[in-house]
Amino acid sequence: MRGDGDGWAVGPDGGRRWGLHGAAGLLLRAPGNDGSPTVLLQLRAAWSHQGGTWALPGGARDSHESPVAAAVREAHEEAGIDSDAVAVRAERITSGTPGSWTYTTVVADAPAPLDTTMNGESTELRWVSEAEVESMPLHAGFADAWSALRTRPVRMLLDTANVLGSSGPTGWWRDRPGATGALLADLAAALPRTIELPDGTFGWVSRVEAVLEGQARTAVVDDTRTHVHTADGSGDDELARLAATVSPAVTTALDPTVTVVVTADRGLRDRLPQDTVAVSPSTVLVWL
């Protein structure tokens, strides 16, 4: 069954909303030339509801569709986006009430700004820097949701030995330099990307800073998306020091940057500055 979602439904405020079974849109993010995040926006055709405003490719869900399936389908129909190039990171109800009409924003990444093809529902499709979105004439619903959907730059510090130890019985301890180099290469290959932070907001990770100690300090790491700090003594001491230090890259950021430390070590977590976000190794291991 296809197309049975087209039609008007009554929204939570009693007003009409498009999509008999709700609606969904795709917030597709990709790195720009400088590595900072861009998002794909659609200038809605003049004949459409709130025509002449910028929003996400999206539309009505069919009865058999999940929000993710609907958002990806709509992005393909309205913008020609190749679904195989889309990596979904999260989904968020940004309007409506569960159990009645809802609009779900599906957050996804692409490895680079993808080529687009318009249909009749668009006047223009454009990859826009996140920093420029608020200055554009936005669809009212998207404008209300944008502050909770945009990313903050993330400075990610990696407790590398702890992450390796959480990766399972791979025998990594028999060749610590080799296992460390392989882990960091695999993580770098997954960047840049959107991550969902513990408070429900989103961050943009363009590189990781890995702390290496002991034998792992001789690991071969050759990727600009990975910066290595070698600890002369305790790796925990170095991580705590780095978390309390503002790097030059952070001070030049236009948006406030959040420092994230990847570790399961409770003792280390207790030593981190109060505004540091600690996440478990599974946060990055799922990238592999």
Image: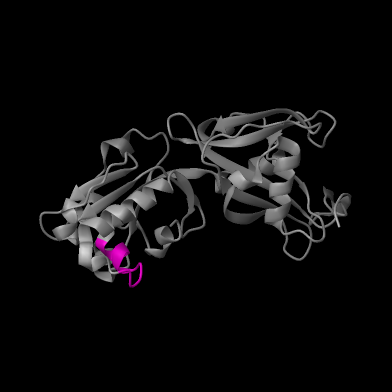
Counting from the top left corner in percent of width and height, residue 1 is at 86, 57
Q: Residue furthest left?
A: 232
- Residue 128 is situated, as x and y percent measured from the top left of the image, at 57, 31
Residue at image coords 72%, 63%: 98
Q: Is residue 133 above or below residue 216?
A: above
* Residue in the image at 88% along x and 50% along y: 8
Write the start and end of the magenta stretch as one range.
161-170
Residue 66 showing in the rendered view: yes
Query: Measuring 79% from the left and 30% from the top, which residue is drawn there?
Result: 45
Q: Does the magenta-highlighted stretch encompass residue 166?
A: yes
Q: Nearer the viewer, residue 16 or 126?
A: 126
Using the rendered image of the protein, determine whether residue 213 is visible from the camera's viewpoint: no
Q: Is residue 222 above or below residue 270?
A: above
Residue drawn 76% across the image and 66% down it: 99
Q: How is the image coloured?
A: one colour
Q: From what the image shows, is residue 36 above or below residue 279?
A: above
The image shows residue 174 at horizontal and vertical percentages of: 21, 67
Q: Nearer the viewer, residue 270 or 3?
A: 3
Write down the quadrant of residue 44 in the picture: top right
Relative depth, front residue between 43 and 88: 88
